[in-house]
Amino acid sequence: MNSKNNEEVICPICGEIMDKYPYAYDNNQYGKLYYKCDVCGHKEVKII
């Protein structure tokens, strides 16, 4: 089982691995992690 720090998020659009997106204004606020796909640009939010 992966820890939350090593979790890989797969893009639902193109299937590539998404990277953490540190530029969201409320990343640490409300316990959210943002991910962005470098291939297609899709963004996704995970609540931790």
Image (cartoon, rainbow, N blue to C red):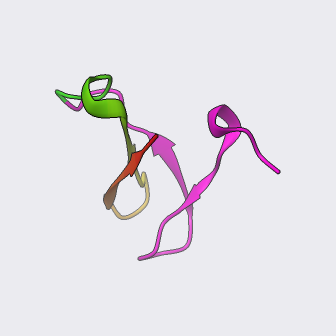
Q: Residue furthest right?
A: 1
Q: Residue furthest top?
A: 28
Q: In terms of depth relative to the viewer, which is nearer, 46 or 9?
A: 46
Question: Is residue 26 one of those drawn in magenta?
Answer: no
Q: Residue at x 55, y 73 (%)?
A: 15
Q: Residue furthest left?
A: 25
Q: Position of residue 11 (x, y in %)?
A: 48, 66
Q: Give the side of residue 4 with respect to residue 15, left or right.
A: right
Q: Position of residue 20 (x, y in %)?
A: 46, 37
Q: Residue at x 77, y 46 (%)?
A: 2
Q: Give the side of residue 24 with respect to residue 10, left or right.
A: left
Q: In terms of depth relative to the viewer, which is nearer, 39 or 8?
A: 8
Residue 17: image quadrant is bottom right
Q: Position of residue 13 (x, y in %)?
A: 41, 76
Looking at the rendered structure, the number of numbered marks drawn on it comes to 0
Q: Residue at x 50, y 43 (%)?
A: 19
Q: Which residues are magenta?
A: 1-24
Relative to 16, say whether 4 is above or below. above
Relative to 40, say whether 9 is above or below. above
Question: Is residue 11 one of those drawn in magenta?
Answer: yes
Q: Residue at x 47, y 75 (%)?
A: 14
Q: Position of residue 24 (x, y in %)?
A: 22, 32
Q: Give the side of residue 24 with respect to residue 21, left or right.
A: left
Characterize the magenta stretch by its predominant secondary structure: loop
